[in-house]
């Protein structure tokens, strides 16, 4: 039996894998022996991500994906299967968000964003599972704001609180994970979520007041490091989590446990 976290021989597709929280996971998967297909909508970012994994000594290929386009999602999964001779794991690290204030959000905005967060997640999971055998693992990125609501007091003016369509979509992903875990369980395919806490991008970190508010809202008194999502994601993909399914692992410094 291989070591619990050994991913040697595993083929893993990471949608949104060139992103801020997706790339560290790809690097760790490759270091643990996996073949990684990084899928992203941004070709420049995708090229850099593939190069970073290869420079770290891992195997990676880059695939384009437009998460708003069903055919693009289906084509990406099939290309990953063909080029990696199978599929053992899938990570969905994508998200949709308008960034608009509540009163400025249109119906079209809400529908379009949740097509990305919900409908496309369903499409990706259903197609990927068709190519998986027992032992396969699906890991979906949810969010702390799919578990709790954003506190408006944490957002100094002129910042707007995290938008409603983002949180609603991420909450839907958590419920979808539970449903799919039951649906695919008899086939031996596990489905789980990770819910990142405060991992603000560099641009948001320029506000010392905002950073202070986020840090004080966690039990550890700090924001998350970019690489701290990699281990939990790999854990749920690996045999170390072979009896875990239908769960949402909050990786948030204790934010949602208060």
Image (cartoon, grey):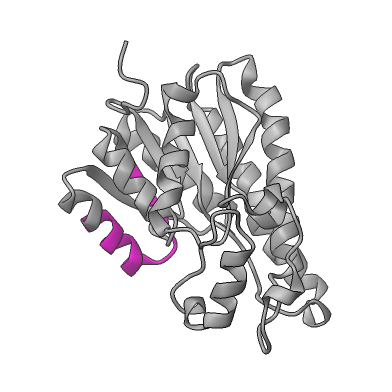
The one of 91 and 242 positioned closer to us in this rendering:
242
- Is residue 49 rendered magenta in the image? yes
Pinpoint residue 74: horizontal percent, then vertical percent. 52, 44
The one of 149 and 253 positioned closer to us in this rendering:
253
Q: State whether residue 255 is above or below residue 187.
A: below
- Is residue 240 rendered magenta in the image? no
Q: State whether residue 30 is above or below residue 99.
A: above
Q: State whether residue 159 is above or below residue 124.
A: below
- In the rendered structure, the answer to whether residue 19 lies left or right of residue 253 reads left
Pinpoint residue 45: horizontal percent, then vertical percent. 34, 66
The residue drawn where x is 68% and y is 51% is 256
The one of 217 and 188 positioned closer to us in this rendering:
217
Quadrant where the image shows the N terminus: top left
- In the rendered structure, the answer to whether residue 98 lies left or right of residue 103 reads left
Pinpoint residue 211: horizontal percent, then vertical percent. 54, 74
- In the rendered structure, the answer to whether residue 47 lies left or right of residue 165 reads left
The residue drawn where x is 56% and y is 52% is 253
Name the image quarter holding residue 104.
Answer: bottom right
Name the image quarter holding residue 97.
Answer: bottom right
Pinpoint residue 90: horizontal percent, then vertical percent. 47, 38
The residue drawn where x is 48% and y is 76% is 205
User: Which residues are the magenta region?
Assistant: 36-51
The residue drawn where x is 69% and y is 47% is 257
Q: How many labels were placed on the picture?
A: 0
Single out the residue that lies furthest toward the top. Answer: 1
């Amino acid at each position: 039996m291989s070591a619990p976290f050994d991913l040697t021989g595993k083929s893993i597709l990471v949608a949104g894998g060139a992103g801020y929280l997706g790339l560290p996971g790809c690097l760790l998967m490759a270091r643990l022996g996996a073949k990684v297909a990084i899928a992203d909508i941004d070709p420049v970012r995708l090229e850099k991500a593939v190069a970073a994994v290869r420079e770290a000594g891992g195997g990676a290929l880059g695939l384009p994906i437009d998460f708003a386009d069903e055919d693009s999602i289906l084509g990406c999964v099939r290309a990953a299967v063909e080029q990696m001779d199978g599929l053992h794991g899938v990570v969905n690290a994508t998200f949709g968000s308008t960034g608009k204030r509540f009163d400025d959000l249109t119906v079209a905005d809400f529908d379009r964003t949740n097509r990305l967060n919900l409908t496309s997640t369903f499409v990706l999971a259903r197609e990927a599972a068709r190519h998986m055998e027992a032992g396969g693992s699906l890991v979906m990125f949810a969010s702390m704001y799919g578990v709790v609501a954003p506190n408006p007091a944490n957002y100094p003016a002129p910042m707007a609180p995290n938008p409603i369509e983002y949180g609603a979509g991420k909450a839907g992903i958590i419920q979808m994970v539970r449903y799919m875990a039951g649906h695919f369980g008899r086939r031996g395919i596990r489905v789980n979520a990770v819910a990142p806490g405060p991992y603000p991008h560099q641009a948001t970190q320029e506000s010392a007041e905002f950073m202070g508010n986020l840090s004080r809202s966690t039990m550890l008194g700090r924001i998350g490091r970019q690489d701290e999502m990699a281990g939990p994601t790999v854990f749920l993909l690996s045999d170390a989590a072979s009896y875990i399914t239908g769960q949402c692992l909050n990786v948030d410094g204790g934010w949602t446990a208060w």
